[in-house]
């Protein structure tokens, strides 16, 4: 069985001084420290996002009153089901002509009602 010898055991003291300095700090492997730091940093960032997601409310439905005024008699139009506003073609105070598009709305029930109206209009 061979005895393992370290290379510095046979060196003279002045030779050791050339290799090792008294103020040398032994280096530790950084792999575990960096991994631990990344995990804790990721957990902190994730917890901030969870707190923000639970406190900030994004509205899914917005109820907006709409009032259109014209030269003719006032007429109230209401829909009991939700309607999605896709585009607003005119701004408040704009002058419009008959037939100008004002809004682009969508709803399955609204589409069905328009289809029934146009079918009844042609008959």
Image: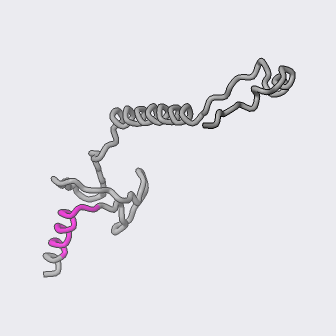
For this orientation, the residue located farthest to the top is: 22
Predominant secondary structure, magenta span: helix
- Quarter assignment of residue 73: bottom left
For the residue pair 121 and 34, the one nearer the viewer reads as 34
Q: Residue at x 64, y 37 (%)?
A: 2
Q: Is residue 117 above or below residue 94?
A: below
Q: How many marks?
A: 0
For this orientation, the residue located farthest to the right is: 14
Residue 90 visible? The answer is yes
For the residue pair 86 and 114, the one nearer the viewer reads as 86
- Residue 31, percent from left and from top: 57, 36
Relative to 16, 77 lies left or right:
left
- Quarter assignment of residue 77: bottom left
- Residue 56, percent from left and from top: 36, 35
Q: Which residues are magenta?
A: 106-118
Residue 108 in magenta?
A: yes
């Amino acid at each position: 069985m061979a005895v393992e010898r370290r290379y510095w055991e046979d060196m003279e003291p002045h030779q050791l001084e050339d290799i090792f300095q008294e103020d040398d700090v032994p280096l530790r492997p950084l792999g575990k420290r960096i991994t631990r730091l990344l995990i804790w940093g990721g957990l902190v960032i994730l917890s901030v996002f969870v707190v923000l997601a639970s406190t900030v409310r994004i509205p899914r439905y917005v109820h907006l009153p709409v009032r259109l005024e014209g030269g003719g008699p006032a007429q109230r139009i209401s829909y009991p089901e939700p309607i999605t506003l896709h585009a607003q073609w005119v701004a408040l105070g704009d002058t419009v002509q008959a037939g100008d598009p004002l809004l682009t709305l969508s709803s399955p029930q609204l589409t069905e009602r328009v289809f029934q109206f146009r079918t009844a209009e042609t008959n």
